[in-house]
Image (cartoon, rainbow, N blue to C red):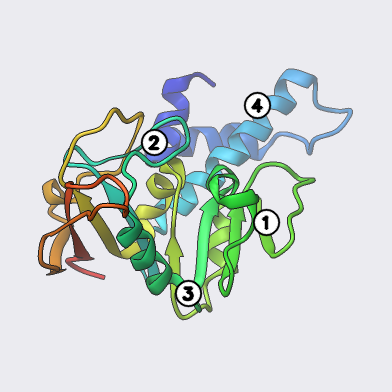
């Protein structure tokens, strides 16, 4: 299995998947009867097959939303932190998410004060660490588990980081974006929804300016809500 095989399998290359299914279908279960190389190949294929089947069943969820702050180039962060200080945006975030579920990666959780769960919200955290435990946090180990865990919640907000946004955006029906009209050195970016025909602007606030004592004073910003054209 090389990188091309991985990409084509997850992308839904049907002829390739049929061949791989045929190769694996007749193989014995993992155990002494399967040598180490074959065992690794079988485990990798089963992982890829699970990812592919999930991809083939992608459907936006009406209860799944994302909230993010971006610069003009859709940069959202650098070195694990935000690139624009804006207290008005923080208040907006609290108002939107309080009383609901927030879904995030572990690094995003660690970026909060003290690495603590957000108050008055259900905190669901994606992590590969099987030993991870944190007060007030519900860990999930995979994308599938995350989606299942929040399926019955009325409103779920994806709050980062970049990889979690990327993986869950196809399942998201609405994105609330704080557009900070400036450029900053960023190493993490959110997809540019203005260039994606799957999304349209549903609402936009008046343009404001970050006040003195409220962060990066003088930077103009606005809140823009995007909705998926078809859900």
Counting residues from the start of the chain, the first of labels 1 and 2 encountered is 2
What residue lies at 63% left-to-right and 50% top-to-bottom? Answer: 115
Counting residues from the start of the chain, the first of labels 3 and 2 encountered is 2
Counting residues from the start of the chain, the first of labels 4 and 1 encountered is 4
How much space separates mark 3 and mark 1, taking CA atoms?
19 Å
Residue toward you, 183 or 19: 183
How much space separates mark 3 and mark 4, taking CA atoms?
45 Å
Q: Are marks 1 and 2 in contact (CB under 8 Å)?
A: no
Q: Residue 98's mark?
A: 3
Q: Residue 41's mark?
A: 4
Q: Residue 139's mark?
A: 1
Residue 59 x/y as whole percent: 36, 64
Q: Residue 100's mark?
A: none
Counting residues from the start of the chain, the first of labels 3 and 4 encountered is 4
Residue 104 x/y as whole percent: 52, 54
Q: Are marks 4 and 1 in contact (CB under 8 Å)?
A: no
What residue lies at 44% left-to-right and 70% top-to-bottom? Answer: 97
Mark 2 = which residue? 15
How much space separates mark 4 and mark 1, taking CA atoms?
28 Å
Secondary structure, mark 1, is: strand
């Amino acid at each position: 299995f090389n990188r091309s095989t991985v990409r084509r399998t997850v992308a839904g290359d049907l002829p390739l998947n049929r061949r791989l299914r045929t190769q694996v279908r007749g193989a014995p279960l993992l155990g002494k009867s399967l040598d180490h190389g074959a065992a690794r190949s079988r485990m990798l294929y089963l992982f890829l097959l699970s990812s592919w089947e999930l991809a083939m069943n992608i459907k936006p969820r009406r209860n799944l939303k994302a909230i993010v702050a971006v610069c003009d180039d859709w940069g959202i962060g650098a070195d694990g932190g935000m690139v624009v200080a804006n207290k008005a945006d923080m208040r907006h975030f609290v108002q939107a998410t309080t009383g609901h579920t927030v879904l995030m990666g572990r690094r995003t959780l660690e970026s909060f004060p003290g690495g603590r769960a957000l108050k008055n919200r259900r905190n669901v955290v994606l992590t590969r660490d099987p030993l991870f435990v944190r007060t007030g946090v519900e860990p999930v180990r995979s994308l599938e588990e995350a989606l299942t865990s929040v399926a019955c919640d009325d409103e779920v907000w994806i709050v980062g980081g970049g990889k979690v946004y990327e993986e869950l955006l196809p399942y998201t029906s609405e994105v609330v974006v704080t557009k900070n009209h400036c450029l900053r050195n960023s190493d993490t970016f959110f997809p540019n929804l203005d260039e994606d025909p799957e999304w349209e602007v549903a609402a936009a606030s008046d343009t404001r300016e970050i006040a003195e004592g409220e962060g990066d004073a003088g930077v103009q910003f606005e809140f823009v809500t995007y909705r998926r054209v078809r859900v």
